Image (tube, rainbow, N blue to C red):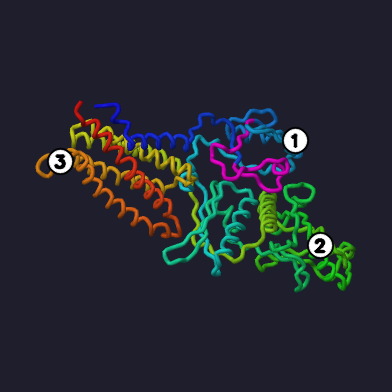
Amino acid sequence: MRLKGFLKFRILLLLALILLSVVWIHPKFDTEGVAIISVQANSSAYDAGVRKLDDVRPTQREVIRALNNVEVKNLDDYARALDEIPLNGSLRITTDKQTYYVLRGQEDIGIAVDAVASTNIQKGLDLQGGTRVILEPHEELTDEQFSILLNTMNNRLNFYGLKDIKVRDAKDLLGNRFIVVEIAGASKEDVKELVASQGKFEARIGNETVFTGEIEDERDIVFVCRNDGRCSGIRSCQEASGGQSCSFEFSIKLSQKAAERHAALTEDLEVNLSFGGKGVLSRTLDFYLDGRMYDSLQIGADLKGKAATDIAISGPGLGLTQEEAFNDANKNMNKLQTLLETGSLPTALEIVEIESVSPVLGAAFVGNALKIGLFGLLAVAVFIFIRYRQWKIAVPMVLTSAAEVFIIIGIAAVAKQNLDLAAIAGIIAAVGTGFDDLIIISDETTRTGEYAASSWKEKVKRAFFVIMVAWVVAVASMIPLFWAGAGLFTGFAITTIVGVTIGVFVTRPAYAAIVEELMRED
């Protein structure tokens, strides 16, 4: 057995990919603190300069180390430290990159955090929990309209403050197009109305439109106040029939053209006296959301014929208790502010499927999968040793299969491919196929008698003819799965194709070279 023999290109390529996978996965041992997952636009943290960096890997996220000099080691420390900061109190956020000074104007400062990632492996919804929604447009859209739809949906969910959002286009085998939305850590109630609502907002006086929430060449609404106790917030709570009612109010700023439309539509209106003795115009300013009246406001007499750019929008929140009504009003205000900031979708959407996944089930699955995987490798090693009675075959077979799994995970990490149940199933399928191929190589290289090939090169050539045919069949069978089930099997198809390809062109040749050297007589 010669050391020089192990420096063959096939073995060196396998070692190089293993080392690259370590770099791609990037195991991180310092996981103290909490990572910034998302920052809500126009929040107090956003105004202080806190930003979520786009397209960064999990281990590169900005990490909060302390709040007002109180050390933050985990999510519990962060929650306790934040609770100690009073409303309207100052907050100093120290991260691994810089320090921010935030005024806590409301309960939520606008930052979503999570545990610091120990690797760049991105868990899919099945493993980390959350909600998956499959949506179908009511109308047939062009590619450009579909792109606008995806961007608007993504912006809407980001503005709303949800974290780990993935919005993608999907097709089925019949060519129907869908939108798949995956949101980690969110419940069905958090996203159901938000993703399915077209969000078409319109303010009318009578039957005439004053302004809309559409995003066109020039927006009617140029600014929406949020997360500010002065120009947005819950204004009052009172008893209502069967419970409590709270009202919210926030201001918006209109463009000059929209303000001039307001002036033109109010110029000829009559002035009446309200129950409080104040002068109000004879028509109200009515707010419609997706064709249904959302709220109606009286217009003060002092705004008659004036190009008012500052408008206050209000709405209700209901609940059995005052706390429930307060939270409902706050949620309704946040949703309406989000819709006004991001604009309406180009078409209404229908929910085809919505499912919620518990993170507890995902964690249990990962633990069980690791145990079963290790047990499976051990069982295969024992079986192979019994079959061939040679450690020179059994040990390299198990090690190359383990290396194959590691490389597949490394490629998934660098490609930012989610590791979900479908992807794990793809890895299992690839490894299962790999063991079949390794057994074919072992049988051919250990065969004796009249049917045995005359040289080692010929033996390996015979084995790889069968392996290459199986690889072509495996890849061809995976291609239709890219579109099956509205794209839910894409992860399985990609992982399987990557796995069997890595196996055929890297690990199987390396295994053949290793066995050749081990079996060679000194």
Mark pair 3, 2: CA separation: 88 Å
Disc 1 vs disc 3: Cβ atoms closer than 8 Å? no
Rendered position, 363 above or below 344: above
Q: Which quarter of the rendered picture does the C terminus lie within?
A: top left
User: Which of labels 2 and 1 is toward the front?
Assistant: 2
Q: Kindly identify which residue carries mark 3.
A: 454
**Label located before the other in sequence (2 or 1):** 1
How packed mark 1 is, by other alpha carbons closer than 10 Å (few <14, some 14-19, many 20 or more), is some
For the point 39% across and 52% down, which residue is it? Answer: 493
Disc 3 vs disc 2: Cβ atoms closer than 8 Å? no
Rendered position, 31 above or below 440: above
Q: Kindly identify which residue carries mark 2.
A: 256
Left or right side of 279 for 183: left
What amino acid type is highlighted by mark number 3?
Ser
The image quarter in which residue 452 lies: top left
For the point 88% across and 68% down, which residue is it? Answer: 305
How packed mark 2 is, by other alpha carbons closer than 10 Å (few <14, some 14-19, many 20 or more), is some
Q: How far from the left and from the top, in percent, is residue 206? A: 77, 72
Q: How far from the left and from the top, in percent, is residue 166? A: 54, 51
User: Which of labels 1 and 3 is toward the front?
Assistant: 3
Q: Kindly identify which residue carries mark 1.
A: 90
Q: Nearer the viewer, residue 228 or 328?
A: 228
Residue 49 painted magenta: yes
The image quarter in which residue 8 lies: top left
How packed mark 3 is, by other alpha carbons closer than 10 Å (few <14, some 14-19, many 20 or more), is few
Q: Which residues are magenta?
A: 37-65
Q: Secondary structure at mark 1?
A: strand
Any mark on residue 308, and which?
none
Q: Nearer the viewer, residue 229 or 474?
A: 474
Residue 93 can be seen, yes or no: yes
What amino acid type is highlighted by mark number 1?
Ser
Q: Secondary structure at mark 2?
A: helix
